[in-house]
Image (cartoon, grey):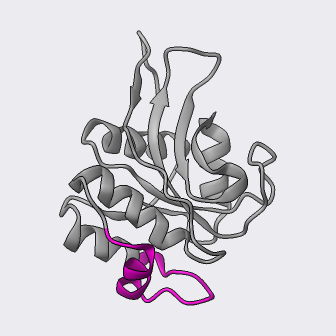
């Protein structure tokens, strides 16, 4: 994927720290909904809606919730190749729809924690201010909490490391 002049784009997605070790799904939905709709419910509310348990949240349920309650354009899809993934991330940025990723950071040293399953959302990309392409994620988890920039390949690899190899965009 080439960007002749480079592009820099961010979305002002608010950060909501997940309330416990398995509320990354509800916290991410809260972040996305608050950004798109301007308000949101509690993480406990979303946990109920998403049927979150101590084992976490099913990504397909999360996808259906976003599509039916936040923005009907949301799609659950395989991430595909790096270029396909970047196209989906860019689509979300251009349409003010943060993509939701399920990541496995276990073998990706760029992340300040190890998790075999964690939801985050995208909130920016930068092809202008190299070196390399960067993606910003809004992370509801403690050590990575906030809007943080990563090398796009590291984020892709973390998403690709997850058994689902899927995203919502």
Residue 94 location, quadrant:
top left
Residue at 37%, 37% (x, y): give it: 11
Residue at 73%, 57% (x, y): give it: 105
Comparing 167 with 35, the one in front is 35
Comparing 52 with 167, the one in front is 52
Left or right relative to 157: residue 36: left
Residue 56 location, quadrant:
bottom right
In this view, the residue farthest toward the top is 5
Residue 137 x, y percent position in the rendering:
53, 45
Residue 57 located within the stretch drawn in magenta: yes
Left or right relative to 19: residue 73: left
Residue 149 x, y percent position in the rendering:
60, 34
Residue 9 visible in this rendered orientation of the protein: yes
Residue 169 visible in this rendered orientation of the protein: no
- Rendered-image quadrant of the C terminus: bottom left
Residue at 81%, 55% (x, y): give it: 107
Comparing 123 with 101, the one in front is 123
Residue 133 located within the stretch drawn in magenta: no
Residue 31 location, quadrant:
bottom left
Residue 136 versus residue 105 in the image, above or below: above
Left or right relative to 169: residue 112: right
Residue 10 versus residue 121 in the image, above or below: above
Residue at 24%, 41% (x, y): give it: 95
Residue 129 x, y percent position in the rendering:
55, 14
The magenta span reads: 41-60
Residue 115 x, y percent position in the rendering:
73, 65
């Amino acid at each position: 994927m080439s960007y002749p002049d480079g592009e820099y784009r961010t979305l002002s997605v608010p950060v909501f720290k997940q309330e416990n070790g398995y509320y990354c799904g509800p916290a991410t939905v809260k972040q996305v909904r608050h950004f798109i709709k301007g308000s949101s419910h509690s993480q406990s509310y979303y946990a109920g809606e998403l049927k979150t348990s101590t084992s976490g949240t099913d990504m397909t349920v999360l996808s259906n919730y976003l599509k039916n309650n936040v923005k009907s354009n949301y799609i659950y899809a395989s991430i595909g190749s790096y270029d396909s993934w970047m196209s989906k991330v860019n689509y979300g940025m251009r349409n003010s729809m943060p993509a939701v990723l399920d990541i496995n950071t276990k073998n990706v040293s760029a992340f300040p924690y190890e998790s075999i399953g964690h939801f985050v959302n995208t909130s920016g990309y930068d092809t202008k201010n190299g070196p390399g392409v960067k993606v910003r994620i809004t992370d509801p988890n403690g050590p990575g909490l906030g809007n943080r920039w990563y090398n796009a390949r590291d984020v892709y690899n973390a998403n690709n490391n997850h058994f689902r190899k899927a995203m919502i965009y």
